[in-house]
Every structure is written in C-alpha cells, then in structure tokens.
Image (cartoon, rainbow, N blue to C red):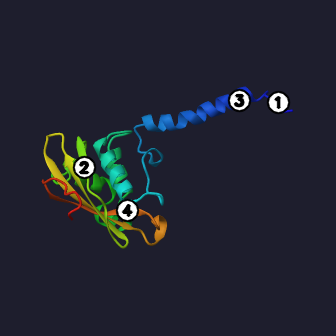
Amino acid sequence: MYSFKYAPLMVLILACLGAIPVHAALSNVADEAVIPQPGLDLQPQDVVRIVINALANNDQPFADAGIATTFGFASPANKVNTGPLDKFTQMVKNDVYGIMVDHVESEFSEVVYDDNDAYQLVQLKGKNGVEIVFAFRLSKQLDGEFEGMWMTDAVWPVGDAMVPQQDF
C-alpha cells in the first residue's frame, strides 16, 4: 500500500516549483523563459500577433520585454543587420518604429504567402493617436537552430492609411 508519509514534503516541493514562474515573471531580469519564443507550431500570423501584443505591453513582465520578444522572433539574417539587442532596442525606440512601443490599438490584414515567405500588414494607433501601417515580411527558416520556424525578416512603415482588407 502507498504511504503518505512524504506528502508534506511533496506539497512543499510542488509549492516551490509553482513559485518559480511567478518569481521569474516578477523579476526585473530579462529571462527568456517568461517571454514567448519561436516554435514549430507558430504560423506567420501568430508570430506577428505575438510581436505586436508584446510591443503593446513593452514593459511586461520586465522593462523592454516586448522589444526583447520582438528581437527573439527576428530571423538570424535580420539579427545580423539589427543586433545585438541593445542596438535593436535603440532602433525600435527611434522616430520610425517608436509608435509600436506601447501602442493602443492594432488591426491585422490577412497573410499573403509566397513559398517560404509571408507578408502581413498591421495598422497601429499610437498613444498619441497617430495611426500608421507597418508591413511584416517573415520567412520559414530552412536550416539551423530555427529550422521550420517562421521568423521576421523585416518590418517597415508603409503609410498612415487604413489596412486594406485583402487588396495587397
């Protein structure tokens, strides 16, 4: 018959294990375990939504977590041009991309596929009420550590008009 003499110890261990994610989420240290990561199960629209939602809440669960998440979903080729993270953070906070940080509204177009590339437009409304459309180009990684995963190759502003329904 099973003995419960170790039940209090098991409760203590489980309580401590449950506290680890809470501690990490409340920590001010950038911890990859608490921000979304690329994965084989994510489609291009999932990647774009994760990035946009992270940027909308840039300082959760730690300062510039949204920017760190965005950098984490950048393709290796993109990171060569925009990294390391400190340089990327400065770029995202500049006049061109700064509206993305802590924006208040977003609207997404449908994804357009071209083999292993995908494109999606996102209209954002900044804290200041300004609206702008950004184009995302993603690619399915063909080799390396991220093989089979969709990652962002480039993001650029395309104007301040409404996002077309599917006319692009």
Q: Quadrant of the N terminus?
A: top right
Above or below, comparing residue 56 to residue 37 in the picture = above
Which residue is the site of mark 4?
151
Measured Cα–Cα span from mark 4 to mark 3: 43 Å
Disc 4 and disc 2 in contact, CB within 8 angstroms? no
Q: What is the three-letter code of the residue carrying label 4?
A: Met
First in sequence: mark 2 vs mark 1: 1
Residue 74, picture quadrant: bottom left
Measured Cα–Cα span from mark 1 to mark 3: 13 Å
Q: Residue 93 got which mark?
A: none
Q: Quadrant of the C terminus?
A: bottom left
Which residue is the site of mark 2?
107
Q: Residue 3 got which mark?
A: 1
Q: What is the three-letter code of the residue carrying label 3?
A: Leu
Q: Residue at x 47, y 69 (%)?
A: 144
Residue at disc 1, secondary structure? loop
Numbered disc in front, either 4 or 3 = 4
Which residue is the site of mark 3?
9
Q: Residues within 10 Å of mark 3 (few under 14, many from 20)?
A: few
First in sequence: mark 3 vs mark 2: 3
Q: Residues within 10 Å of mark 2 (few under 14, many from 20)?
A: some
Measured Cα–Cα span from mark 3 to mark 2: 50 Å
First in sequence: mark 4 vs mark 3: 3
Measured Cα–Cα span from mark 4 to mark 1: 50 Å
Residue at disc 3, secondary structure? helix
